[in-house]
Amino acid sequence: MTQVDGKTVFDEAAVLYDKARPSYPKQLVRDTIEYASIPADGRILEIGCGPGKATVLFARYGYPILCVEPGPNLVEIARERTRGCPVEFEVSSFEGWQAEEGAFDLAYLASAFHWLPEEIALPKLASALKVGGALALFWNRHPGPQSETLEEVAAAVAKYRSDPGSRIDPNREFERSVREQVGKLDASGLFGEVTVKTYPWEQTYSAREYVELMDTYSSFRVMPADAKRALYDEVYTIIERHGGSVTRSYRSLLYLTRRK
């Protein structure tokens, strides 16, 4: 499969990413803030804020937030979305960012942790947190086709995608990824007990909206143009044939832990 550059693939489609990607459950944010127990003068760090979909939810709690994001186009959207809130942005890769030692009470990453280089990710995040500071990692996952329409969409994707990821059982992958992520946090020796929470929800898409959503995922964006266009046309036709809309089930997955 083509190597994906996480620093540019989303920034090149910043407007589409902002339009098509869903936000996160408000309860997830409330649970994170409650867990973190941030003092009145506390600070929050976000790595990989993208267009600020999670940022604006955390900003409503009034704590100063520093967002580190390598995509300037995404930062421009996030800055507008959080206008009037105590949010600052630094356009930088995580690797190039100069962490402030022990400066933050909460660090969180929304659908971004998997893009960080493993050898420096957890040590650098731990160094930026105060002792006892909270780390939150979360993603929007989807447990796989749950309707005839999405079964047909999955079959279409499998025809055009040659990578093994297109044939993985999403439910087994969900369970495996939880075990793996908890294992990484434990193995680092930098963090305490890990709490895992899930939040089920659904979103309905028109045929065009679903194709736009697909086009925000790196695995589709790096496909050859002809194959991608043929796949999107087929997916659009499938959804139109089934009434013009499709409902996708999500499970937002949250990991919470504290720096030792």
Image (spheres, rainbow, N blue to C red):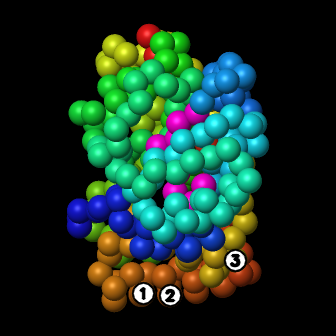
Does residue 151 lie above or below 252 as drawn?
below
Foreground residue among 41 and 204:
41
**Cα–Cα span, label 1 and label 3:** 18 Å
> What element does badge 2 sit on?
helix
Left/right of residue 30 with respect to residue 151 in the rendered view: right
Q: Are the residues flagged by discs 2 and 1 in contact, CB closer than 8 Å?
A: yes
Q: Could you tell which of marks 3 and 2 lies nearer the N-terminus?
A: 3
Residue receiving disc 2: 233
Foreground residue among 164 and 100:
100
Residue receiving disc 1: 229
Magenta stretch in the rendered image: 44-52
Q: Could you tell which of marks 1 and 3 lies nearer the N-terminus?
A: 3
Pinpoint residue 251: horizontal percent, then vertical percent. 62, 44
State the mark number for residue 49. Answer: none
> What element does badge 3 sit on?
strand
Q: Are the residues flagged by discs 1 and 3 in contact, CB closer than 8 Å?
A: no
Q: Which amino acid does label 1 sit on?
A: Arg
Residue receiving disc 3: 206
> What element does badge 1 sit on?
helix
- Residue 96 visible at all: yes
Does residue 97 lie above or below 160 as drawn?
above
Q: What residue type is labelled 3?
A: Ser
**Cα–Cα span, label 2 and label 1:** 6 Å
Name the quadrant of the C terminus.
top left
Q: Is residue 55 covered in magenta? A: no
Q: Residue at x 29, y 61 (%)?
A: 5
Pinpoint residue 235: horizontal percent, then vertical percent. 53, 79
